[in-house]
Amino acid sequence: MASTVRQCITLKGSTEIVAEFFDYAINSILYQRGIFPPETFTHKQQYGLTLLVTTNDELLKYLKTVIGQVKNWCQELIVQKLVVVIKRVDTNEVVERWQFDIQCDKTVNSKTKRDKTEKEVKEEIKSIIRQITATVTFLPLLESVCSFDVLIYTDKDAEVPFNWGESGPHFITNSEEVRLRSFTTTIHKVDAMVAFKKTD
Amino acid sequence: MSQFDLENEMRSALRMDAPLTRGPQMKWQQKKSTDPGNLSLNSSAANGSLLSSNKTPSKHGIPPAASQSKTPSSQDMGRKTPKSAGAHKTPSKGSKTPKKTPKAADRFIPNRTTTQFDVNHFKLMQDPKGENGPQDMMSPSQVEYQRVMSENLNGDRLAHRIMSYKEKAPAAPEEYTVFQNTGHQGDLRVLYSTTKTPASAKKTIRHIPQVPERILDAPDILDDYYLNLLDWSVNNQLAVCLGGSVYLWNASTGDIKQLFQVDGPEEYIGAVSWIKEGNYLAVGTSSGEVQLWDVAQQKRLRNMSGHSARVGCLSWNSFILSSGSRSGNIHHHDVRVADHHVGTLSAHTQEVCGLRWSPDGKYLASGANDNLLCVWPAQSTINTQPLHTFSQHQAAVKALAWCPWQPSLLASGGGTADRHIRFWNCNTGTNLSSVDTKSQVCALLWSKEHRELISSHGFAQNQLIIWKYPAMTRVAELTGHTARVLHMAMSPDGETVVSAAADETLRLWKCFSVDQEKKKTKTKSVGKDPGSTLRTMIR
């Protein structure tokens, strides 16, 4: 019975999937790029993969707040992009930029149901997460201590919630870009891309 | 025309290999066909009709304020290449200014990265009413042009907001950042930067020019296998015997001067050899005399007689000059004393054509037309017997060379009947290896820089071969001479080899070029040298 219920995707379900994906994607990036020490990560089975998620309380709290807000905006269908910016602590120079373009189907309301199984979506997500893991092989090594920031592009008319502020786009000067895979819940479509500083 | 449609379709359906004419249209074709409509649709804000036909509806789902000013294609462009827009430069520069004030800061520095002055100014200055006026007068293409221009100038910044949580992400624990190099990133560094080790970057194959760097004429050079008519001094002077005269070619300046000429018309020079210091030249003549010349003064210092036949080879060991003669005798001359003849080595029964002291002065190697190769100890008496006598060569042994890096390793090459290069350990007297060159071996030289040696050959190719030692694989073959290459000498820097052939030419080959890094270290060590030589001089 339960499986027949999950056969279609609603706006709420889609939002959950997207938010969950961002959570794991950001965790994976932070682990793979060595932004946080590896011993603060713990293994977790998800999407048929063993993923690493942080155990750092502050970081958990931060991610929870940010992902929670993204969830709200996803629900309202006004989010356009989520960008994870990695920058050097000493010079504040942006060295890496993980961009997730989100395309929301604006015709959807809380009652629409789309025919796509959760399993199919998770297969697509799995391949993106795998790609994120694989990017370590070609991304330039982060030579100095780096921190990260999450930027969210929303529609112009979005309300700015408490404790949020507008920011610059944090582009990388002289960058090289690599497109990753994408996934869609038919309500939200997420394209992944990573930009990094050219090394020569 | 419509009556042909059915027929045409039938035909195209039956032809399997014909280009596809049916099928869905390509994207550009679709666009082309809908383009004129697109313009009007955009300006009239009738987005709903487009929505149903487009495959990516979400692009158009953005509120009218934003989407009205966009065609799908240009929107894509704007997203993919946001950095190309000039207006973006300022914010990215601005992002470099520190956001967080340093820990010990005592001033408040306002953060202006989020305030987009240029955009705000533009928005303020833009009078919606004033702009609408002329816009009504403009043609659809002008409107479109204006829209594209404003998009290019402003980017897609006006279409969205960029939000970030004001409480920034927590920083990594300090002990991690301190020991970062030994931590996770250290592991990454080990994993992903090992390919950059210099070992793999090192060039294993060196470029060897196949053509001579220079060709000099050597008229009247004697075509005689048993003579040694070429030597290069440490002062970069090349001594060449052309018949009865000795010429000096200054390799640095290119000057040529004739040192002297023998008196008799039948006489000629059989051998030349520079002393290690490069200021004196020893000359062996056809009359069996050994002469010593001061090059700077162009003056003969000594004339040492003693040989009964022509002198075909000479070799220096500090102040001892050894000379080999057609009689088969080898004489040692102490050039400092009046009674110069200090030793005679007589083991050869035929003309001595190869004579070479080892670099450490411990051994003298001699090869002769009796196919014997003898190695003599440095201390000689009247009845000295050779340390080793090697009889493996099947022809005259002229080419002799001592290895510069491995003491007591001797390479020798045989004549036409033998054609082998053989390697000898003179401490033990064993034959280490031999290689058949398929051609007469006239001369041999070891490289000072590379683990290689070069041999010069006669018939059939008259070539020079560079060998890798000890593998004895051929590195390169230098062809160009049209007659057998009788003599070779190496420049004092070890990079260039000069070869003299019976075709009356000298060719300079830059075959042992040194790469720059090694050269640097070498010049450094050379820089230290004067001190040490000075010390030996004082003693």
Image (spheres, coloured by chain):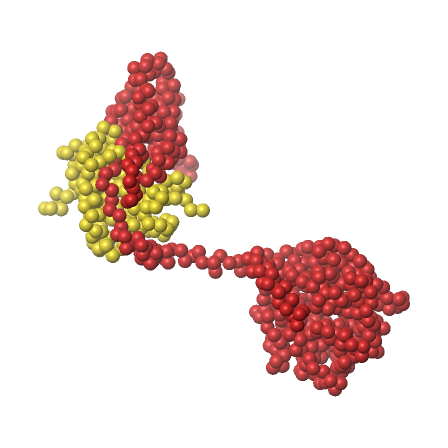
Chain colours: A yellow, B red
Q: Is residue B498 left or right of residue A74?
A: right
Q: Can residue A115 be seen in this view?
A: no
Q: Is residue A5 above or below residue B141?
A: below
On the image, which quarter does residue B429 sit in?
bottom right
Where is the N terminus of chain B found, in terms of image quarters? top left
Q: In this view, does B67 lie to the left or right of B394?
A: left
Where is the C terminus of chain B found, in terms of image quarters? bottom right
On the image, which quarter does residue B481 sit in?
bottom right
**Front in this rendered view, residue B465 or A117:** B465
Q: Is residue B147 above or below residue B58?
A: above
Please report the residue visible at 57 percent of the width from the left and 56 percent of the height from the top. B516
Please report the residue visible at 70 percent of the width from the left and 73 percent of the height from the top. B318
Image location of residue B206, percent across then percent down: 57, 58
Q: In this view, does B523 lie to the left or right of B82?
A: right
**Front in this rendered view, residue B55 or B467:** B467
On the image, which quarter does residue B123 sit in?
top left
Image location of residue B455, percent across then percent down: 67, 66
Residue that lies at the very extreme toward the left in this rendered image = A1
Image location of residue B91, percent across then percent down: 35, 34
**Front in this rendered view, residue B253 or B138:** B253
Image location of residue B532, percent across then percent down: 62, 67
Residue that lies at the very extreme toward the right in this rendered image = B264
Q: In this view, does B417 lie above or below A5?
A: below
Count of numbered circles on the image: 0
Please report the residue visible at 21 percent of the width from the left and 32 percent of the height from the top. A160
Please report the residue visible at 20 percent of the width from the left and 52 percent of the height from the top. A55
Q: Can residue B275 be seen in this view?
A: yes
